[in-house]
Each structure stands twice: as structure tokens, then as C-alpha cells.
Amino acid sequence: MSAGRAVTFAHANIALAKYWGKRDVANNVPAVPSLSVTLEGMRTSTTLELDGSLSADTFELNGTAAPTDALARTVTLLDRVRREAVRATYARVSSQNDFPTASGLASSASGFAALALAAVTAYGLDWDTARTSDLARRSSASAARSLLGGFVELGNELPSSGVLGAKQVAPPDQLDVRVLVCVTSEGQKAIGSTDGMGRTATKSPYYAAWVERAPEMFGELKAALLAKDLERVGELTEASALAMHASAFAAGVVYVTGATLEAMTRVRELRASGLAAWATMDAGPHVKVLVSRTDSAAVKAAMERVPGVLRVLEAKPGAGAGVIEGGK
Ligand code: 2P0
């Protein structure tokens, strides 16, 4: 029996070993494996109700009707679930992000993770986390990782089962770290990730080198994480981001700004002065700093003084997605 209604949550995640590029565009299979940390406190909450009186799905985001492209991506996910559940009823979806929308943290990861879990629950599918994560991956690959807590990996090959979900590598307390999100601009329109990856794959002379090297960096980072070697995790985190951005840069896909470079430079200076801090950047101009818990306050204070850094949010490793209402 279907619950018919579900309330779920999921948190944002930051990739330490980056995903950039697609092996299989139609099935949204990444070209390289990735490893992320799920962040506590940066949360999307989603309510999904089946309603037999609806003639189409509806999607409200932060209290207003979602943009057309976000609605279309939501409908695509719901259509997949309806086919599996053999149930045609449309749904009313409402999502809220509790982190500032202009925080520079992409909400698509937590958003699609919370949506996938809500849809599976409300349509009454008895799926495990791997299958729900696979569903989220098909909408946005980084979302697959937000189903799980702590340190999480996502592979780059579709198994014969057809299910490629993310897996937890280590619990949240594996490393005593914080992530400082250094916001460098408000609402700047960057090149979307999917578009940026596509342009990098077709235009960058360095894309092949990225695809060859990234799996090695992923493997080295995973080993360092399992060994609780923060120094090595940090080095590889920064190296992965620089390699990803170098490959994109050569295709004219430029996410960094002057403020990004100022912030990255400051992180290097802080590290040279003995603080445990490493920078990483995603498909936008903001800088996220992986920092040891003990150095977090000092690094945060320093980053707040960097010209072009508007504010700094602090997050710690957190839990995976969960069902608040509607589960078994
Ligand atoms: C990541 N990013 O590993 C990388 C690093 C951004 C830079 O995953 O095309 O929104 O929807 O699968 O997941 C952002 O890309 O891309 C992303 P699609 P997604 O976190």
C-alpha cells in the first residue's frame, strides 16, 4: 500500500574528489568516480502528496512556483517513479532550503535527494538506499551522494543491474573537520554544471588528461580518508579541484573570479603559516575550505577578511537523507 504522502529531508554535499564529465549522457553516468562529504545543517525539506484531482504535477520551491526547468526535471523523476509503481496519480511537491539560496551551495544535490526519497516513499516503492540513490543520480549525479551521510563515493560505471547508487565510505566522525563555505558573489549566473561538463568534454585539450588522472586521485583520497590522514585528504581535495577547473578553463568554462583567486591564495598562506586548510571550488565562484575542527575558528576569521568574500558559513559532516513522515 502506498503512503500517498511523504515528508523527507536531505543535506548538501561537497565533493573532495570531483565528478566532472559524463561517460553516458543518456543515463547520466559520471566519467570519473567522486568522493564527497555530506554537510549537516544545509538541508532541503520536501513534502510530496499524491492527489487524484491534479491534471499535472506541481512544484513549489521556497514558497513560490518553481522555474519551468526545475519543474520539468522534477516531472522526469516522478515519471520514472510512476512507471515503476504502476500508478499514474500526479503529485504536489513543495521544497524548502534552510540554507540561504544565494549561499553558493548548489541546492540540486540536496533537492533531488530529498525528492527521490519522497517520491519512492509516497508512491509506495519498497526500495533500498542504493536504488533511491540511483534514481537521484539520474536527475543530478551529485544528488546520489546526498542520500548518504558522512563520506560518500559514487562510481563511474553502470553495473549490469542498471543500478548505480552512491555508497558510504566512512561515517561523519571519520575526520575531525569542518567545511567553510566562503561566499564570493550573490546570485551570479554561472554556466550550469551539465553544460559546463559538455563543453569541457568537447572543447578542452585537457579533458582526456582529467578523465585519466581523476580516478587515481579518487583512489588515493579514499585510501587517505580510510587511514584518517587529513593532511593527504586535504592535498588531494585541492588537487582534484584544481585539475577539474584546469580542464574546464581550457574549454572557456571559467567559474573562478578575482575573489575566488584571492580566497584560494589566502588558504595557501594560512596553510604555510601552519593551519590545516585546503580549498575546493565547484561550478561557481565560491571557495569551500576543508579545515581541521581545531583550526576552523582562526581560518573562518581570516577568510571573512579576504576582499571579495561576502560571508562564511561553517558546516560539519552530517547525516544522510531521511523520512520524517510517510515511511514504514
Ligand atoms: C561534484 N559538481 O562532484 C561536481 C564538482 C560540480 C563541480 O556534481 O549534470 O548538478 O546534474 O549530473 O550533479 C555538479 O553537477 O550535474 C557537480 P548533473 P550536477 O560535486
Image (cartoon, helix red, strand yellow):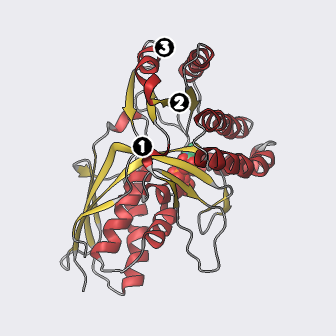
Of marks 2 and 1, the one in the foreground: 1
At label 2, counting other C-alpha atoms closer than 10 Å, the crowd grade (few under 14, some 14-19, many 20 or more) is many
Relative to residue 175, is residue 222 depicted above or below?
A: below
Would you say the residues marked 2 and 1 are in contact, meaning their CB atoms lie under 8 Å apart? no
Residue at 28 percent across and 61 percent down: it is 8
Of marks 2 and 3, the one in the foreground: 3
Q: Position of residue 3 (x, y in %)?
A: 22, 78
Please state which of residues 215 and 317 is positioned toward the viewer in this rendering: 317
- Give the CA distance from mark 2 to mark 1: 22 Å
| Element on which disc 3 rests | loop
Q: Which mark is residue 317?
A: 1
Relative to residue 258, is residue 32 depicted above or below?
A: below
The disc labelled 1 sits on which kind of residue? Pro
| Element on which disc 2 rests | loop
Residue at 41 percent across and 83 percent down: it is 83
Q: Position of residue 247 (x, y in %)?
A: 73, 40
Would you say the residues marked 3 and 1 are in contact, meaning their CB atoms lie under 8 Å apart? no
Residue picked out by circle 3: 306
Residue picked out by circle 2: 285
